[in-house]
Amino acid sequence: MVEVVVLRGDISRMNTVFKFYMQVWVLLGLGASLALAWTLSEMRAWLAGWRRLWQGLGFVLISSAGLFMLLGVSAKIQDRMAQEAPRTLDGMHYMQSALYYDRDQELTLHQDYEAIRWMQENVQGSPVIVEGHAGEYRWGSRYSIYTGLPSVIGWNWHQRQQREFVPGNDVWARVGDVQAFYESSDLTVVRDFLNKYEVEYIVVGQMEQAYYPEEGLAKFAAQDGHLWDEVFHYEDTRIYRVREQAAVSDG
C-alpha cells in the first residue's frame, strides 16, 4: 500500500515508509516463518519432482540471502575511518587517530575528541550550543551528536523531513543564521543570534575554520572576556561560554 499511497506533505515519502515498513517487515517475517513450517509439513505428499525443484530453489534463495551475513558484515567491519583504531565498543575511539578531509583541508579528529570529552565531563544540564553547519554526510553536528546537547541546527535533511511543518521552525533560516553568525564581524548580528537561540556554548574548531572566513572567526578571540569566555583550548580547537550580558546591545 505504501508504494502507491503517501501522506500529504510527507517529504520523499520517508515518514510513511519508515513508520509502516517497520511493522510490515515484522509481519512478513512472522508470516513467512509460519508458511515455511506448514509447507515442510505438507511436502511429503508432493510429487518427487516438484519437491526436489522447490527444495533446490529454496536452498538457492536462502543461501543467497545468507551471503549478506558473510559479505555484508565483513565489508562493514573493514569500512573504517581509521584502520589502526582498535576494535572496541567505544564509539568515539576512532577519533583519536582518524583524519577527515573537507574543503581541501585536513581535519585531525583527535581535537574534536578532546573537546567533546570536555563537554561530556563539564557541561551541566542541556544548554544550547552552536557549531558550524555542514551539508549531509559530512563532519557536521558532531558535538550535538556525541553530547546530546541541543544545537541551533541539526542534520538538515532530517530536520526538514521531521519538522518541516512545525509552526515557526524555518530550517533553512536556521542554516542561514548559523552561517551569518560565524561569518559576520557585526557584533549586533552576533548578539541578536545569541539572544534569539539562547546559545550558551560556541564551538570553533577545525571544521569551522575550514568553512568560514578568517575575518569572521577573528571576533571570537577579539571578544574573549567581553561577549564570551574561552573555557576550552586544545591545539586549533576552542570552546567559548557566552556571558549573560552578551545579548545586550552597547546601547
Image (spheres, rainbow, N blue to C red):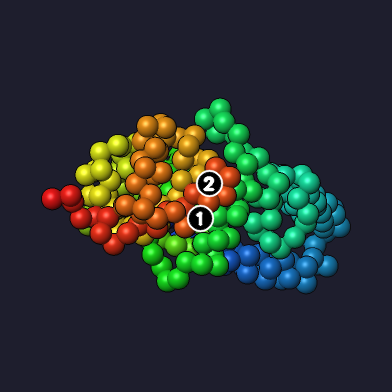
Q: Residue at x 46, y 46 (%)?
A: 204
Residue 98 coordinates in the image, percent (x, y): 68, 44
Horizontally, residue 159 falls left or right of residue 209, namely left
Residue 127: which quarter of the image? bottom left
Q: Are marks 2 and 1 in contact (CB under 8 Å)?
A: yes
Q: Amino acid under label 2?
A: Thr
Depicted 215 relative to depicted 24: above or below: above
Residue 108 coordinates in the image, percent (x, y): 63, 41
Provide the residue designation for mark 1.
232
Depicted 95 relative to depicted 19: above or below: above
What is the secondary structure assignment of the residue under circle 1? strand
Specify whether residue 77 is in view. yes
Provide the residue designation for mark 2.
237
Question: Could you say which is closer to the camera, residue 237 or residue 155?
Answer: 237
Q: Residues within 10 Å of mark 2 (few under 14, many from 20)?
A: some
Q: Considering only order in the chain, which callout, 1 or 2, is on the residue closer to the N terminus?
A: 1
What is the secondary structure assignment of the residue under circle 2? strand
Quarter holding the N terminus is bottom left
Q: Amino acid under label 1?
A: Phe
| Cα distance between the residues tagged 2 and 1 | 8 Å
Residue 208 coordinates in the image, percent (x, y): 46, 40
Q: Residue at x 51, y 55 (%)?
A: 232
Q: Residue at x 75, y 60 (%)?
A: 88
Q: Residue at x 80, y 62 (%)?
A: 46
Question: Could you say which is closer to the camera, residue 19 or residue 160?
Answer: 160
What label does residue 146 carry, if any? none
